[in-house]
Image: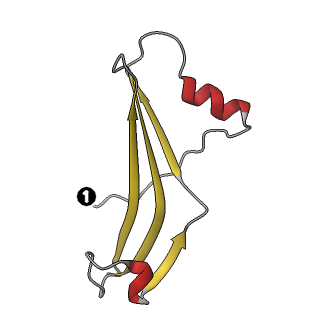
Amino acid sequence: FPQLWNQFSRLTLVDFNMTERVTIDLDLDWSRADSSPNTSAKGSGRCVRGLTDFCIIEVKRDGRGAGSVVTKRMREGHVHPTRFFSARKN
């Protein structure tokens, strides 16, 4: 089966009340499995796909209190949620 390594940088933000966590994944890269996962895909010459102008933002809430400030600001900037699914091995 074909295999890919992925690499990314992650920022995690948590509110003072510990009711919301935001993760932001940046510098997403994929490389072929025959390159080392500890070697930068960008520098190895084996990069399959790099998304430098793209990020994944995930907002997790415990359900208490008012709506998310992050979600509100994103909607004001016309950034709307998009869902995507990953294949899982059974």
Q: Residue at x 56, y 23 (%)?
A: 69
**Crowd rating for badge 1 (residues with CA inside 10 Å; few <14, some 14–19, many 20+):** few
Q: Residue at x 56, y 66 (%)?
A: 52
Give 14 or 56, whichever is nearer the viewer.
Answer: 14
How many numbered callouts? Answer: 1
Residue 23: image quadrant is top left
Amino acid at the residue labelled 1: Asn
Residue 12: x and y in percent read 38, 41
Q: Quadrant of the C terminus?
A: bottom left
- Find the residue positioned furthest to the top: 65
Q: Quadrant of the N terminus?
A: bottom left
Coloring scheme used:
secondary structure
Residue 48: x and y in percent read 48, 81
Q: Is residue 42 above or below residue 82?
A: below
Q: Is residue 80 above or below residue 25?
A: above
Q: Circle 1 — which element?
A: loop
Residue 77: image quadrant is top right
Residue at the spot of label 1: 90
User: In screen coordinates, is 30 left or right of 79?
Assistant: left
Q: Residue at x 51, y 76 (%)?
A: 49
Residue 9: x and y in percent read 40, 58
Residue 80: x and y in percent read 66, 38
